[in-house]
Image (cartoon, grey):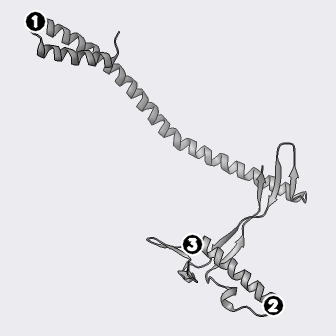
């Protein structure tokens, strides 16, 4: 039994031979071509069955993706709830850190994040630092806002340490935004 590629090559060779040879009779040519076309056709039909099966499998996978995405979300929610419970247990025990043979559990402070109180009040820039990303809509640049607020806070702290009153623009350098510490989280290494 020949492969489809081999049959196709034989077919092409036979066509070339027909164009150059005078020895083949019309009956010989017709019989050979019919046999080869049948073999190649059978091979291609069999491959098409495989292609349809593969397409069916791909369609099944596409349908399963939605179901599995829902399951993934469910698993992630359960994992988050268990981590939150472990954090609560660690806090109830009054421990900041607990080492076991397999893990180190730490009651870690949340990251400081920028909370946008009013996007309309946020200036486009502060001392040359762009505080908003301009696209089709104006989006506050939280990273830049955080840097500006922290920097102004450090300068205000220095002024207060000298016993002086810091200017109002240092106390609220980005109107419409303030810093807030996020909720505590559990870290496991």
Q: Residue at x 65, y 74 (%)?
A: 146
**Residue 66 in the image: above or below residue 105:** above
Query: Is residue 98 toward the left or the right of residue 142 in the image?
Result: right
Q: Nearer the viewer, residue 91 or 140?
A: 140
Q: Residue at x 76, y 89 (%)?
A: 159
Q: Is there a contact, CB below 8 Å, between mark 3 and mark 1?
A: no
Q: Residues within 10 Å of mark 3 (few under 14, many from 20)?
A: some
Q: Nearer the viewer, residue 24 or 4?
A: 24
**Residue 42 in the image: above or below residue 115:** above
The label shown at residue 9 is none
Q: Which corner quadrant of the image does residue 38 belong to?
A: top left
- From this viewpoint, which residue is outermost toward the bottom? 164
Q: Quadrant of the N terminus?
A: top left
Q: Residues within 10 Å of mark 2 (few under 14, many from 20)?
A: few
Q: Secondary structure at mark 3?
A: loop
Q: What residue would you read off at disc 2? A: 162
Q: Nearer the viewer, residue 9 or 106?
A: 9
- Between circles 3 and 1, the one closer to the viewer is 1
Tell me where residue 128 appears, x and y as whole percent: 55, 81
Query: Is residue 99 toward the left or the right of residue 80 in the image?
Result: right
Q: Which corner quadrant of the image does residue 153 belong to?
A: bottom right
Q: Residue at x 41, y 32 (%)?
A: 55
Q: Mark 1 or mark 3, which is nearer the start of the sequence? A: 1
- Between circles 2 and 1, the one closer to the viewer is 2
Tell me where residue 109 appears, x and y as whole percent: 78, 64
Q: Residue at x 19, y 14 (%)?
A: 14
The label shown at residue 25 is 1
The label shown at residue 141 is 3
Tell me where residue 87 appears, x and y as whole percent: 81, 56
Q: Secondary structure at mark 1?
A: loop
Q: Mark 1 or mark 2, which is nearer the start of the sequence? A: 1
């Amino acid at each position: 039994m020949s492969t489809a590629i081999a049959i196709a090559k034989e077919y092409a060779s036979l066509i070339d031979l027909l164009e150059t040879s005078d020895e083949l009779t019309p009956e010989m040519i017709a019989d050979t071509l019919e046999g080869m076309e049948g073999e190649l056709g059978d091979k291609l039909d069999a491959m098409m069955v495989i292609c349809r099966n593969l397409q069916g499998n791909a369609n099944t996978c596409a349908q399963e993706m939605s179901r599995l995405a829902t399951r993934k979300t469910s698993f992630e929610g359960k994992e988050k709830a268990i981590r939150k419970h472990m954090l609560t247990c660690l806090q109830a025990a009054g421990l900041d850190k607990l080492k076991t043979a397999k893990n180190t559990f730490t009651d870690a402070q949340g990251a400081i994040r920028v909370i946008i109180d009013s996007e309309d009040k946020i200036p486009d820039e502060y001392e040359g630092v762009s505080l908003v990303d301009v696209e089709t809509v104006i989006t506050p640049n939280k990273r830049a806002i955080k840097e500006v607020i922290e920097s102004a806070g450090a300068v205000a702290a220095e002024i207060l340490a000298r016993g002086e009153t810091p200017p109002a623009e240092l106390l609220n350098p980005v109107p419409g935004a303030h810093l807030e510490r996020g909720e505590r989280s559990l870290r496991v290494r």
